[in-house]
Amino acid sequence: MSGIKVLVAGASIAGPALAHWLFRRGAEVTVVERAPGLRPGGQAVDARGIAKEVIRRMGLDAEVRAARTDTAGAYTVDVDGKVLETYRADDDGGDGYISEIEILRGTLSQVLYDDTHDDVAYIFGNRIAELTQDADGVDVLFASGDRQRFDIVIGADGLHSSLREQVFGPRERYVRHLGLVLAFYTVPNEFDVDRWVIDYQESGRSAGLRPIGDPTRAMAMLSFPAADFAVDYRDIEAQKSLLREQMADFGWLTPRILAHLDDTPDFYLDQVAQVVMDRWSSGRVGLLGDAAFSASPMSGAGTGLALVGAYLLAGELAAADWDPEAGFAAYERHMRSFVEANQEIGRLHVHSREATGPDAEPSVDFESEWFTDLIGRAINGVELPDYAGVPDSRAPIAR
C-alpha cells in the first residue's frame, strides 16, 4: 500500500469502479453511501467501445456479460403497435442504439461491489456532512459524527451531488436542464415483452417497455418535454402526479402502464440534465461520473464515462505519485474531449425528439459524415494508457 487514504462518496457505478482501480494502484479506500445499502434495479445502462476494454482490464468481462439483460434489439412502433423501425443489438459491432452489453444499473453496481468489498471499506447509511481541506489533507465530518482525515476525496454521488455543492457551489451553476423529463419503473409483464425494447414516440413524448431479464416483469419508460423542472427529486408522490398529468392523454399502451404507478417498487423520475463544469477538481477534492460530467440518459454514455473516468482518474493520480494537482489535471486532459462528444450526443438526441412543425429547427442528419465522426469520438475517442510503471496489485507475477 502507498499509505494514501482516499474517500469516495457514492456507491452506484462510478464510486465502486474507482475504488477497484484505486485499490489496485495502492491506495487505502473508503466508500461512503447515504443509502442504507446498494440500490437494486434501475434503468438499463450500456457499455460501448472503449468502456468494454476497461471492463476487460478490470477482469470483469465474464461477470458483466453473464448479468446482461440479453436484449435482442428495439422496435419503434406507431400508436397501433405496428413496427416502424428495427434496431438490433449486434448492429455496429455491438455499439449501436442497443448495446451488446446492456445491464441494469443495480446489477452492475452489485457486480462492482462484489468485486471490491473485500478490499475496500464501505460505509452505508452515512454521508459527508462537512469537509475542510488544507495543503496536506482533507478533514471530513460524517453525518454520524465520526471524523476522519483523508489525503484525497472524490465525489461520485451523481447528478445531484451534495459533495459538488459543498465544494464547488450551488447546483444551478452546473446542472443544465435539457427540456425533457424521464421516468421509469418496473411493471408486471402483462404486455408480453420478450427480448425486444418497444418504443412509441409522438410530439416530443414517448412511452416504452423493455425486458429486464425477469420474464414476469418489464421496465416501463416514459418521457415528456418540460421547459423547466421544479419538482423535488426526493418527492415521489409529486413526481407521480406530474407524470400522470403529462401523460394522461398519451396513446398506445400508456394508460395500462400508468395503472401500475402505485404498486411499483422502484419508481424513478428526474429531469434529463447535463453537468457542465470548467474544472472537476478543487485542491484535494475531485469529481467523477455524473457528479462531474453527466451527459444525461439520452446520451447512452453515463456508464461508459464513469468506467473510463475511474480508470483514468486512479491511474493518473498514482502516476503523479498521488499529487492531486498533477493527477487531477492529467485526468481532465484525457477525459475532456471524450466527455464533450458524449454530451453533444445527448443534446442531439433530445433535440431529435422535439415536436416538428413549420417553425421547428432542422432535424439532425444522422447519416452525415459529421455525425458519424461524432459517434466515433463518443464511443472510442479517448486513449487508455497502460500505466506500465504504476503499481497494480492484480498484475501478473513475472516468472
Image (cartoon, helix red, strand yellow):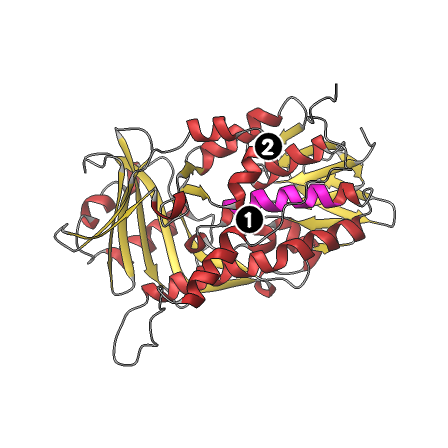
* Residue farthest top in this picture: 399
* Residue occupying image coordinates x 68% and y 26%: 394
Nearer to us in this view, 323 or 154 = 323
Report whether residue 37 is seen.
Answer: no
Circle 1 is placed at which residue position?
A: 305
**With 12 as the anchor, is 95 left or right in this view?**
left
* Residue occupying image coordinates x 74% and y 34%: 25
Disc 2 secondary structure class: helix
Look at label 2 and name its amino acid. Answer: Met
Q: Is residue 389 magenta?
A: no
**With 199 as the anchor, is 116 left or right in this view?**
right
| Label number found at residue 58 | 2
**365 to 256, vertically: above or below:** below
Q: Quadrant of residue 246?
A: bottom left
Report whether residue 141 is seen.
Answer: yes
Q: Picture coordinates of residue 47 (x, y %)?
A: 47, 42
Q: Picture coordinates of residue 169 (x, y %)?
A: 67, 60
Magenta span = 303-316
Nearer to us in this view, 278 or 50 = 50
Give the prevailing secondary structure in the magenta stretch: helix
